[in-house]
Image (cartoon, rainbow, N blue to C red):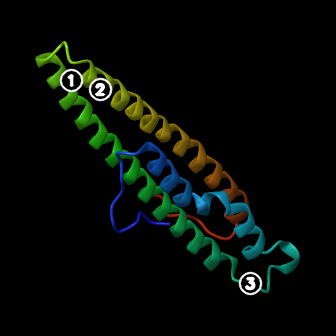
Amino acid sequence: MAAPSGGVNCEEFAEFQELLKVMRTIDDRIVHELNTTVPTASFAGKIDASQTCKQLYESLMEAHASRDRVIKNCIAQTSSVVKHLREEREKNLDDLTLLKQLRKEQTKLKWMQSELNVEEVVNDRSWKVFNERCRIHFKPPKNE
């Protein structure tokens, strides 16, 4: 699933996480998708597995790239907010509200950065399952 066209709200971490959860649907359902669309040896003649695997490959590539863009965009936005708050904090060391806001944004930034690690695990799992079932039916381009 691609990112929503209305943009991504990076200000609320819960919304950001919910969006990623929805965008990870293809990865969550890959085993089911492969079981229902890629035939076992006994049904090999009834379905064009190479076309099915190619379509799934393209869908996975698009989903992974889309999520990567969303995560990195939110990290960049939040990093910018943290930088701005740090600069403000240096000008006004006594402002506890500013310090609290800075800590909150720094924590959110760390959570967003950890989503990159989660994304790597999700992607690796999906590609492993994909390759197990589709390696004899479809060879991805070398440049990917």
Instruction: Read off the residue under disc 2.
Output: 102
Q: Which mark is residue 86?
A: 1
Mark 1 vs 3, N-terminal side: 3
- Residue 124 location, x and y as percent? 60, 47
Look at 30% across and 39% down and name the residue there: 78
Is 117 placed above or below 137 here? Answer: above
Give the amino acid type for the residue marked by disc 3 in the picture. Answer: Ile
Observer able to see residue 143: no
**Is label 3 or label 2 in front?**
2
Give the amino acid type for the residue marked by disc 1 in the picture. Answer: Arg
Give the amino acid type for the residue marked by disc 2 in the picture. Answer: Leu
Look at 38% across and 53% down and name the residue there: 70
Look at 21% across and 18% down and name the residue there: 95
- Residue 64 location, x and y as percent? 48, 56
- Residue 121: quadrant of the picture: top right
Q: Badge 3, how many Cα within 10 Å: few under 14, some, many 20+?
A: few
Mark 3 vs 2, N-terminal side: 3
Left or right for 42, reference 44: right
Q: What element carries label 3?
A: loop
Look at 28% across and 35% down and name the residue there: 79
Q: Do the residues labelled 2 and 1 touch (CB within 8 Å)?
A: yes
Mark 2 vs 1, N-terminal side: 1
- Residue 32: quadrant of the picture: bottom right
Instruction: Read off the residue under disc 3.
Output: 47
Left or right for 144, reference 69: right
